[in-house]
């Protein structure tokens, strides 16, 4: 389970739908008292961002024509974890499709292009900065 510190528009289908499912899993784990210490220590989850990421990812799913009919259950936020710097570049190394989205199809993808790509490759103006999470 992990949250990507990446604009949801730049996630490929697999990673978009995957992150959505995982936000629900995180809340399930929190509500069942299951330890997520390993995720916190590796910089994969920041509980303060779970709801915002779920809603942003769900909105992007809707934009792409996928059904999103699963509001996130309530949970008590322990305010734990952080998202590791460099995760965007990590995603690009793991996933050709995400890298392509991030680079706008150009060769070479760095974290910088991942972040810079959003306004450049966006096919149409989007609602303000919805779903855009700042990396610290
Ligand atoms: Zn949902
Ligand atoms: Zn991907």
Image (cartoon, rainbow, N blue to C red):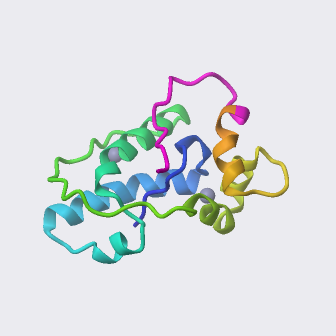
Identify the residue shown where x is 29% and y is 56%.
47
Residue 8 location (% of width, % of height): 53, 44
Q: Is 125 inside the magenta-drawn segment?
A: yes
Frontmost residue, 72 versus 110: 110
22 left or right of 15? left
| Residue furthest out toward the front | 136
Q: Where is residue 44 in the image (x, y as percent from the top left)?
A: 42, 66
Residue at (42, 63) in percent of width and height: 2
Q: Is residue 120 left or right of residue 89?
A: right
Q: Residue 78 in the image: x percent, y percent?
A: 18, 59
Farthest bottom residue? Answer: 38
- Residue 77 is left or right of residue 2, and the answer is left
Residue 118 lies in the magenta stretch: no
Q: What secondary structure predominates along the stretch shown in magenta?
A: loop
Q: Where's residue 70, x and y in %?
A: 30, 43
Identify the magenta region. 120-136
| Image-quadrant location for residue 22 | bottom left
Mark count: 0
Quarter of the image where the N terminus is located = bottom left
The answer to which image quadrant residue 89 occupies is: bottom right
At horizontal 58% and vertical 41% (from top left) the residue drawn is: 9
Q: Is residue 36 above or below residue 99?
A: below
Q: Residue at x 20, y 48 (%)?
A: 73
Q: Which of the pair 82/52 is nearer the observer?
A: 82
């Amino acid at each position: 389970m992990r949250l990507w510190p990446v604009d949801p528009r730049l996630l490929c289908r697999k990673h978009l739908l995957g992150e959505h499912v995982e936000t629900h899993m995180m809340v399930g784990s929190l509500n069942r008292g299951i330890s997520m210490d390993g995720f916190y220590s590796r910089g994969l989850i920041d509980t303060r961002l779970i709801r915002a990421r779920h809603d942003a990812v769900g909105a992007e799913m809707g934009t792409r024509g996928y059904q999103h009919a699963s509001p996130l259950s309530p949970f008590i936020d322990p305010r734990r974890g952080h998202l590791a710097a460099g995760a965007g570049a990590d995603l690009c190394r793991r996933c050709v499709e995400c890298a392509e989205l991030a680079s706008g199809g150009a060769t070479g993808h760095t974290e910088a292009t991942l972040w810079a790509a959003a306004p450049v490759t966006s096919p149409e103006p989007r609602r303000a900065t919805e779903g855009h999470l700042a990396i610290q």
